[in-house]
Amino acid sequence: IILGKIKKKLRSEVYKGIYDAISKGDNDANNVGQRVILPSSYIGSARYMLNNYQDAMAICRQYGNPDLFITFTCNVKWPEIVREFNAKPGYKPEDRPDIVSRLFKIKLDDMINYIKSGEPFGEIEA
């Protein structure tokens, strides 16, 4: 009896997956119903996020809760970005996200190095 209920449930899940795929316009039957599990090494996957969360909780358990929560956002009016796009007429920052993200990464790394230097907040424990 239990096996029959499980089969019905599994079968209905397969049909639901097929219905969803057809309604999205996916006509390739090879992709319907195949489950893809991404490893923790794939940045952004559920396992990656879970591992990072568990690492953060272990650090909090060892050293206590963090004193700061810092966010860092990009502004397309930063002088570096404006200067770069003034040198390339006809381009806008939204046309070249590779340049904007590279400049953002450089500024982010500079900020992280400044914080890690111990200058603004003192010695870092974790």
Image (cartoon, grey):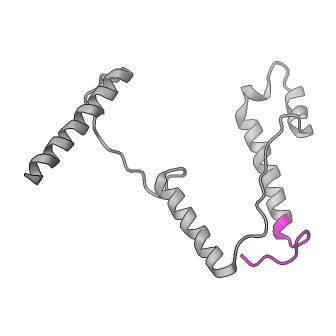
Quick check: can you spot residue 87? Answer: no
Task: Check the image and name the residue furthest to the bottom.
Answer: 62
Image: magenta residue range: 115-126
* 79 in relation to 92, above or below: below
At 52% across and 64% down in the image, what residue appears? 51
Is residue 107 shown left or right of residue 49?
Answer: right
Task: Check the image and name the residue furthest to the front.
Answer: 1
> Camera-side residue: 28 or 102?
28
Residue 115, given in percent of the width and then of the height, sits at 84, 66
> Camera-side residue: 60 or 117?
60
At 71% across and 34% down in the image, what residue appears? 97
Residue 48, given in percent of the width and then of the height, sits at 51, 57
* 16 in relation to 123, above or below: above
At 85% across and 70% down in the image, what residue appears? 117
Quick check: can you spot residue 38? Answer: yes
At 61% across and 68% down in the image, what residue appears? 56
Residue 98, given in percent of the width and then of the height, sits at 71, 36
Q: How many marks?
A: 0
Q: Main secondary structure of the magenta part?
A: loop
Magenta stretch encompasses residue 33: no
Magenta stretch encompasses residue 117: yes
Q: Quadrant of the C terminus?
A: bottom right
Task: Check the image and name the residue furthest to the left.
Answer: 1
Residue 55, given in percent of the width and then of the height, sits at 57, 69
> Camera-side residue: 19 or 33?
19
Is residue 111 shown left or right of residue 96?
Answer: right
Is residue 126 shown left or right of residue 77?
Answer: left
